[in-house]
Each structure stands twice: as C-alpha cells, then as structure tokens.
Image (cartoon, helix red, strand yellow):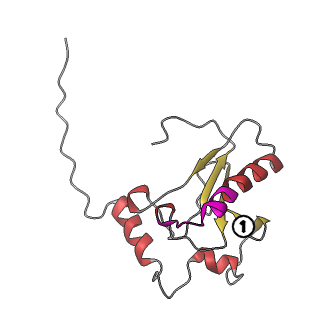
Amino acid sequence: MFRILRLKRKRKAKFSLEKFFSILSFNSVNQNTEKTIFEKIIDREIPSEILMEDEQCIIIRDIHPCAPLHVLIIPKKKISRLGEAENGDETILGHLLFMAKQFARKQSLNGGFRIVINNGPDALETVPHLHVHLIAGQRMGWPPC
C-alpha cells in the first residue's frame, strides 16, 4: 500500500539564491569600464596567493572552496564567458586545460580531479571573466548537480 503524503506548500522566497548570483554576476562590474576582481588580481591591485603563473594565465585558490582543493585557472586576456569566446581564443582555451593538467601533476592529484566552467547566470557564474575551476581532494558525486 502506498501512502500519499501531502506536502505543505513552501512559501516562495522573495529573493532566491539564483537571483542573488544573477544580480551579483551582472552588477559586480560595469562590463565596459570597471575591471573585474580577476583583472585586479592579475594586475596586482588586489593581493592573492598566486599558485602558478605563466604569460597567459594565473592559478589562485577559490575563496569559497567546495572541496579540500579548489583553484581557479584564469586567463590574463579577459573573455567574459565561454559562450562569448571569439575566433582566435582557441589557443587560450586549450591552454587553460593544459595548465589544469600541469597543476594537477604538480599537486600529485593521481586520484583525479574535476574541471568546471560556469557560463551565465543560470550556471551561477559570479564573475564575468572566464575561469576554470579545478576541484579535487575528495570523492566526487555524479551527476554534479
């Protein structure tokens, strides 16, 4: 016999987390005039521990880690998001993944790691500057959402 449970209707939140991140993402920087937080870190205007760096990108720790190891691989060239990459950006996009491999090897992440790229407000992108998340140090679940 199956029991049917009546669930109380939850009140709709006046301000959802998704809405918060959407507003944060698009209000955190005026796309044309202000630098993103990542540009300020790259230009050394904001201090951050740079774990690796080359002429095309930097790797820093995520300030809101979701695993024991959570870093961001950020191109020095500003690309707002993956969906806005242009012809000619293929080299830097590939380089970001290559640097993820280099960092993983340096950290001896032999058990594996996860790569995440958020694109737009529905993906909870919080900074309009493309970056790759490298997440490791724990067993990951699937599906990721």
Residue 94 lies in the magenta stretch: yes
Residue located farthest toward the front when viewing the structure as drawn: 87
What quarter of the picture does the C terminus occupy? top left
Task: Describe the element under mark 1 as helix, strand or loop.
Answer: strand
Relative to 143, is 45 above or below? below
Across and down, in percent, residue 127 comes to: 51, 69
Mark 1 — residue? 58
Looking at the rendered structure, the number of numbered marks drawn on it comes to: 1
Q: Give the residue displayed 61% in from the left and 60% down from the top.
A: 90
Magenta-drawn segment: 84-95
**Nearer to me, 90 or 112:** 90
Residue located farthest toward the top when viewing the structure as drawn: 1
Type of amino acid at the residue the image marks with label 1: Ile
**Nearer to me, 86 or 142:** 86
Q: Give the residue displayed 75% in from the left and 69% down from the top.
A: 49
Mark 1 neighbour class, 10 Å CA radius: few under 14, some 14 to 19, many 20 or more: many
Across and down, in percent, residue 117 comes to: 54, 55
Across and down, in percent, residue 62 comes to: 63, 61
What quarter of the picture does the N terminus occupy? top left
Q: Give the residue displayed 67% in from the left and 48% down from the top.
A: 68
Q: Is residue 97 left or right of residue 143?
A: right
Q: Quadrant of residue 48?
A: bottom right
**Nearer to me, 142 or 84:** 84
Residue 105 lies in the magenta stretch: no
Across and down, in percent, residue 11 comes to: 21, 53
Q: Is residue 96 left or right of residue 129?
A: right
Q: Quadrant of residue 3?
A: top left
Q: Give the residue displayed 78% in from the left and 67% down from the top.
A: 54
